Image (spheres, rainbow, N blue to C red):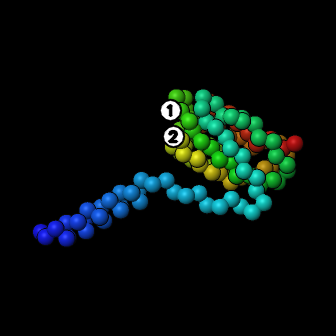
Amino acid sequence: MSPRPRSLALSFFLALTTACTAAPEPAAAPPGSRTVSVIVGTSYTPSEITAAPGEALRLVFTRTTDEGCGQQLVFPGLDIQRDLPLDQPVAVDVTAPASGRLAFTCGMAMYQGAVVVR
């Protein structure tokens, strides 16, 4: 095999590997939404997010430790589940309910958080 096809194959392999492992760029936040950052350590900070009824929110979760059960995020009432890679922000767009609260938890439901309508 000549060097040229071998280098093309290697270039293709590297491009494919990089494309498969690179974190996807988050889409733009919906117009008019408010962005709230949530740090996932051994709990959620903040664990309670106050919102107006029907307010559009972009919640950006960033897991900062391997300790605890923060590797997954679940919104039980919305059937949303996301993996939270270490030190990579993960955006979740939600709409606050008309009243009450919208709960979110870790995969084991040990970490508790909520969007609370006031």
- The answer to whether one can see residue 108 in this image is no
Q: Are marks 2 and 1 in contact (CB under 8 Å)?
A: yes
Question: Mark on residue 66?
Answer: 1
Along the line of sight, which residue is nearer the eye, 100 or 18? Answer: 18
Residue 1, relative to residue 92: is it above or below?
Answer: below
Q: Is the C terminus in the top left, top right, bottom left or bottom right quadrant?
A: top right
Q: Which amino acid does label 1 sit on?
A: Asp
Q: Which x, y percent locates residue 58?
A: 70, 52
Q: Which residue is drawn at 53% across and 38% down?
A: 71
Residue sitting farthest toward the left: 1
Look at label 2 and name its amino acid: Leu
Any mark on residue 86, and which? 2
Residue 69 seen in this snapshot: yes
For the residue labelled by badge 2, is the local secondary structure a helix, a strand or a loop? loop
- Circle nearer the N terminus (2, 1): 1
Look at 13% across and 70% down and name the residue there: 2
Q: Judge the density around disc 2: few (<14), some (14-19), many (≥20) Cα neighbours within 10 Å.
A: some
Q: Classify the position of the N terminus by image quarter.
A: bottom left
What secondary structure is marked by label 1? loop
Within 10 angstroms of label 1, few (less than 14), some, or many (20 or more) residues?
some
Q: In which quarter of the image is residue 15?
A: bottom left
Name the residue nearer the viewer: 79 or 112: 112
> Residue 82's x, y, as percent?
57, 47
Q: Residue 49 carries which label?
A: none
In this rendering, the answer to whether 98 lies above or below 109 is below
